[in-house]
Amino acid sequence: MLARVKTLADVLAEHGVEVVPTTADRSLRQTCAGRTLERLWERGGEEHVRDLLACILESENNGMALTS
């Protein structure tokens, strides 16, 4: 049986991150940087994005740091 391939949306959901429109007011774990995350995914892959999210989200008082 083949393993299911993870997508950027899967990884963001695992970390509780939601991509919102650039016109939206962000709250904790929301970002308008969807296109930037897509480029990072394309260039660095799943592990790179996971590491990046962990660094940002696990840093103290950094819940609003997900901006492009």
Image (cartoon, rainbow, N blue to C red):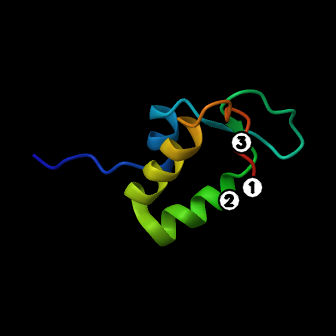
Task: Name the element at disc 3.
Answer: loop
- Looking at the rendered image, the quarter that the C terminus falls into is bottom right
Q: What's under tag 3, amino acid-wise?
A: Ala
Q: CB of mark 2 within 8 Å of CB of mark 1? A: yes
Residue plotted at (84% across, 47% down): 22
Task: Name the element at disc 1.
Answer: loop
Circle 2 or circle 1, nearest the eye: 1
Real-space Cα separation, disc 2 to disc 1, in angstroms: 9 Å
Q: CB of mark 1 within 8 Å of CB of mark 3? A: no
**Badge 1 density bin: few <14, some 14–19, many ≥20, Cα 10 Å:** few
Q: Residue 35 carries which label?
A: 2
In which quadrant of the rendered view does residue 30 lie?
top right
Circle 1 or circle 3, nearest the eye: 3
Which sits in the foreground, 27 or 21? Answer: 27
Which sits in the foreground, 62 or 12? Answer: 62
Seen as rendered, the residue at the extreme front is: 60
Task: Name the element at disc 2.
Answer: helix
The residue beneath circle 3 is 65
47 lies left or right of 33: left
Q: In this view, does 28 lie above or below 42?
A: above
The residue beneath circle 1 is 68
Q: What is the tally of numbered marks visible in this picture?
A: 3
Q: Residue 19, how many percent across, how many down?
A: 67, 41
Q: What's under tag 1, amino acid-wise?
A: Ser
30 lies left or right of 5: right
Q: In this view, does 11 lie above or below 45?
A: above
Q: What's under tag 2, amino acid-wise?
A: Arg
Q: Residue 54, how many percent across, how many down?
A: 48, 42
